Image (cartoon, rainbow, N blue to C red):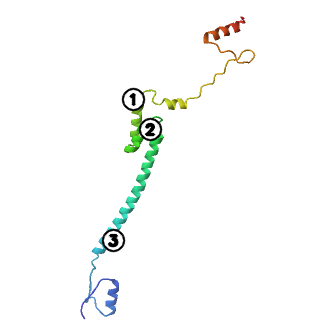
Amino acid sequence: MKNIKVSNTDQLRTAIEAGYTKDEIEIVAVDNTAAIAAARREGVDEGKAAGITEGKTLGAQAERDRIAAINDLALEGFAKERDEAIKTGASVADFGVAQSKAMKDRGPTANMGAMRRDAPAGAHANQPKDDDGKAAEVKSGWDHAVATVKKQLRIA
């Protein structure tokens, strides 16, 4: 008999059943280099695609979080600094520093609007009443002081 070449288990069984001896059977390795390279390329491509998708998702979420944090930190009257920070991609910390410097440059009135908004409302002054409960004539400061003293001393 001639020598036979086998490359897998099924071919080996068939050769043995056909009566070949171990000296007549040559086991050869199949060249899988092309199949391995194709599988590797496919895996790399799938991994890159998954990475790009996840990167875009995480990047978009990080950008939304950055903008929300800048908006939360922004004070009234500092829209220019806020918009610039969002536009240039500045970090929240960098925006905080820029806003603080702008407040310092503008002086103590930089955030007056927010202070006015947060301050409690002043008490309303009622028009003075006379002894009968009717609205009294409003006098100048001096006239009012003299009238008050006369009333307290019961001077006509």
In the rendered structure, the answer to whether residue 76 lies left or right of residue 11 reads right
Residue identifier under label 1: 105
Residue identifier under label 3: 39
Identify which residue is drawn at 67% across, 20% down: 127
Which of 28 and 140 lies nearest the eye of the viewer? 140
The disc, 2 or 3, on the residue closer to the chain's N-terminal end is 3
- The answer to whether residue 90 is above or below residue 133 is below
Which SS class for mark 1?
helix
Which of 7 and 92 lies nearest the eye of the viewer? 92
Amino acid under disc 3: Ala
Amino acid under disc 2: Ala
Identify which residue is drawn at 68% across, 15% down: 137
Which of 61 and 117 lies nearest the eye of the viewer? 117
Image mark for residue 79: 2
Identify which residue is drawn at 46% across, 27% down: 109
User: Quadrant location of residue 7?
Assistant: bottom left
- The image quadrant where one finds the C terminus is top right
